[in-house]
Image: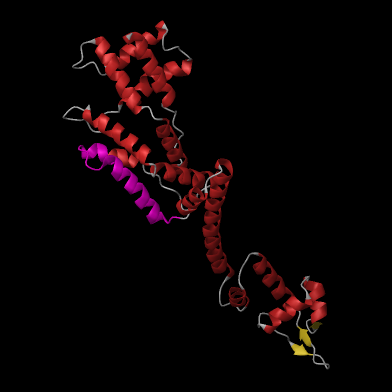
Amino acid sequence: MDGGTLYSIGELAQRTGLTVKTIRFYSDRGIVEPAGRSHAGYRLYAPEAVARLALVRTLRELGLGLAVIRQVVDRELTLSEVAAEHAAALDAQISILRLRRAVLTAAANRKPTLEEMELMHQLATLTAAERRRLIDDFLDSVFEGLHRRSYHAAARRSMTPELPDSPTEEQAGAWVALAELSLDPDFRASVRRQAEDHLAHLPDEAPTPPRPDVAAIARDLAGPAVARGISPDSPQADPVVEALTARFAHGRPDEAELHRWLVHRLEAARDPRRDQYLRLLALINDWPTPEPLTPVLDWSITALRKRAA
């Protein structure tokens, strides 16, 4: 290409794929300046204007504003600096869009009322500090005032969601569902009762880490039997029931009484919403998905009742 060649705005449009109107707009704003004028007064552009306009077009398609583009083409900002800042801005926008999509997906599946939709939107748009306050309020309602601070602290850590800065759509949706669950007064009361029941049956000198609660013990002992499909009223279930009662036999020599006491505790711990909370928590925190406790508790309750009878 002859370095002395000058292009009219029409020729420049043909070479760049931009419209004459667009090039004139960029020229009026000093992003691409004419190298001279024709005898008739029309703007003429040097060959480097083609490369300059190609860069402008690319940056516009990436979503950059004209002010930033002008700084780039005038070399006041490097492309790497602009790219880093723009990528960060896009990350923030993507996070917001994921949260919005999670709300809309949940709404499509649940057919919420206007009030529920507003709550879901509010929960999805909370800041990190606001999310922390919401969960702290939930955990305070569960554990505040209970003794055994070591248990209190460990339990709080195990129940605290940490939504990433750039959550996936699934994590965003899980956060909205978990936050709604944590605001449910009945669920709060249920988890509080479970915590109180567990602490009430701990020995005075509780070990560190704290002893597992009755639901966790039932999971460890009865879980394999449930997985193998063993019926709770079959003879194959006897060793599981014996192991379970042996863990709590201290101070309760009467077997029938022990069975009834264990049934009462397992029924108190049986809340499918607990499984839901733990599943959502694992998804948000990118933890392994826990096995649901409800089937194991149901199995254990049935097995104990059969033998108590």
Q: Is residue 284 above or below residue 80?
A: above
Q: Quadrant of residue 257?
A: top left
Of all residues, the one furthest to the top in this rendering is: 235
Q: Quadrant of residue 108?
A: top right
For this orientation, the residue located farthest to the left is 204
Q: Nearer the viewer, residue 1 or 91?
A: 91
Q: Residue furthest bottom?
A: 39
| Residues drawn in magenta | 126-153
Q: Principal SS element in the magenta part?
A: helix
> Going 32% across and 10% down the picture, which residue do you hit?
308
96 left or right of 221? Answer: right
146 drawn magenta: yes
Q: Position of residue 227 (x, y in %)?
A: 47, 19
- Based on the displayed image, in which of its 4 quarters is residue 45 positioned? bottom right
x then y, percent, for residue 57: 70, 70
- Whether residue 120 is in magenta: the answer is no
> Taking 254 as reference, is 76 above or below it?
below
The C terminus - image quarter: top left
Residue 307 visible in the shown view = yes
Is residue 210 in sight in this rendering? no
> What residue is drawn where x is 41% and y is 8%?
236
Residue at left offset 76%, top offset 72%: 18
Question: On the picture, is 17 further left or further right than 301?
Answer: right
In the picture, measured across the screen, residue 140 lies left or right of residue 76, that is left
Q: Nearer the viewer, residue 283 or 182?
A: 182
User: Quadrant location of the N terminus?
Assistant: bottom right
Left or right of 59 on screen, residue 9? right
Find residue 9 and report its horizontal and vertical position in percent.
Answer: 79, 81
Q: Residue at x 55, y 51 (%)?
A: 98
